[in-house]
Image: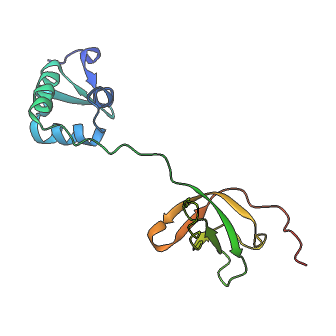
Amino acid sequence: MIENPITFTAEADLAPLYGLPLKSLAAIRHRHLTEEAHWKKIGREIRYTAAGLQALAERLQAAEPPPAAPVPGPALTAALVITRSRIRNPKLVLAKKSGAAVAEGEPAPAPEIVRVKVKDNAKLRPGMVLDPCEPLDAENGYWVYRGKLPRKPRPVW
């Protein structure tokens, strides 16, 4: 006996309701549900029967909730000043990162020299500011600049 396909619920519609990726629902379906009783494939789409929806809800309640995803914080960016632009690698420039704020009377820390990955260093000159730069591997001193490069280089005298 063939049931009316309108009463079936699509798996793609269930994934956002449960807050799970489609692959997780598919894995539960393959492990715990049977094809004719709980779900059917109609064309290229998987559709759940009423019994399948109930079995899926029971499975998801029995399963442990997934660990909370870490909340992404604001992207760490900084303005870097180019110190040396003519190096052998045309995709890198050396830049300095200013130190943290210092109390009065204390000497300012030496600027940290970092490597900045750019599209092309031909039009970049010492003293230019690259803002904003994002850390690529900040522990090892690698940053990346994704902004627009200048159209014309400043003349070198």
Question: What residue lies at 33% left-to-right and 29% top-to-bottom?
Answer: 16
Q: Quadrant of residue 13?
A: top left
Which residue shows up at 60% across the image and 69% down it? 116
Colour basis: rainbow
Locate residue 104: give its quadrant.
bottom right
Q: To which quarter of the image does residue 118 belong?
A: bottom right
Q: Is residue 116 above or below residue 54?
A: below
Left-right relation of 151 to 33 = right
Q: Which is nearer the eye, 88 or 132? A: 132
Residue depicted at x 58% and y 70%:
107
In this rendering, the answer to whether 112 lies above or below 20 is below
Can residue 119 be seen here? The reply is no
Q: Position of residue 55 (x, y in %)?
A: 11, 26
User: Can you say which quadrant of the picture contains the C terminus?
Assistant: bottom right
Toward the viewer: 36 or 129? 129
Which is more toward the observer, 76 or 42?
A: 76
Q: Is residue 64 left or right of residue 145?
A: left
Any part of residue 58 in sight: yes
Where does residue 147 sit, x and y in percent of width and height? 67, 56
User: Which quadrant holds the N terminus?
Assistant: top left
- The percent position of residue 139, horizontal first and vertical second, equals 44, 70
